[in-house]
Amino acid sequence: MLRVKLRHLEAWTEARRAAAAHYDRLLAGSGGPTPEAMSYARHVYHIYAVRSPDRAAWQNVLQDQGIQTGIHYPTPVHLLPAFADLGYSAGQFPHAEQAAKEVLSLPMFPEITAAQCETVSRAVLELANGDSGLRADRTQEAQA
């Protein structure tokens, strides 16, 4: 099975890279961080993540609009039970901990269409600009 899938890997990677470039153009005015490609590496965009201090509320609003999102890394590595023997505790890596609370993965797959990217981006921009109708009660509900 993997041998069959491997033949498609490059095309799937290029399709995700094209979708990510489209997201980049569409979300340029969001004011929030988007994935950054490093000059020394080739990003495959397995995940296209954005950040929001109101991640739970954003996720709820996007879900209400039929847009699936994900939280792929909810726990920083230093707080995972598998690494407990290293002796790290909460507060020692504040940037990682903050990212774990804010990162939200947008839809990303090889078959995503330009229209789908545009729908997602429009919703994210509305959230980022405060134009989504996101009410205080919705934010509090998401945080509960």
Image: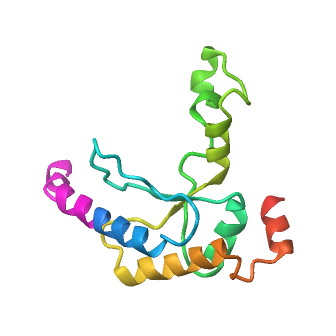
Is residue 86 highlighted in magenta? Answer: no
Quadrant of the image occupied by residue 81 = top right
Q: Residue 80, how many percent across, how many down?
A: 61, 30
The image quadrant that residue 56 belongs to is bottom right
Q: Is residue 8 left or right of residue 41?
A: left
- Give the residue drawn at x 31%, y 53%: 44
- Give x and y (percent) for residue 84: 63, 20
In the rendered image, residue 21, in percent from the top left (x then y), is placed at: 34, 67
Q: Nearer the viewer, residue 121 or 88?
A: 121
Residue at the (72%, 67%) spot, across then down: 57
Tell me: residue 113, above or below residue 79: below
Q: Position of residue 134 (x, y in %)?
A: 75, 77
Q: How is the protein colored in the picture?
A: rainbow
Instruction: Look at the magenta stretch and give its main secondary structure.
Output: helix
| Numbered marks: total | 0
Q: Of 7 and 36, which appears nearest the observer?
A: 36
The residue shown at (36%, 56%) is: 45
* Residue 114 shown left or right of residue 53 in the figure: left
Rendered view: 24 above or below 41? below
Q: Quadrant of residue 129?
A: bottom right
The magenta segment is: 1-15
Above or below, 134 relative to 9? below
Task: Give the camera-side residue of 107 and 39.
Answer: 39
Q: Is residue 4 above or below residue 23?
A: above
Q: Is residue 33 left or right of residue 43?
A: right
Q: Is residue 11 magenta?
A: yes
Q: Quadrant of the C terminus?
A: bottom right
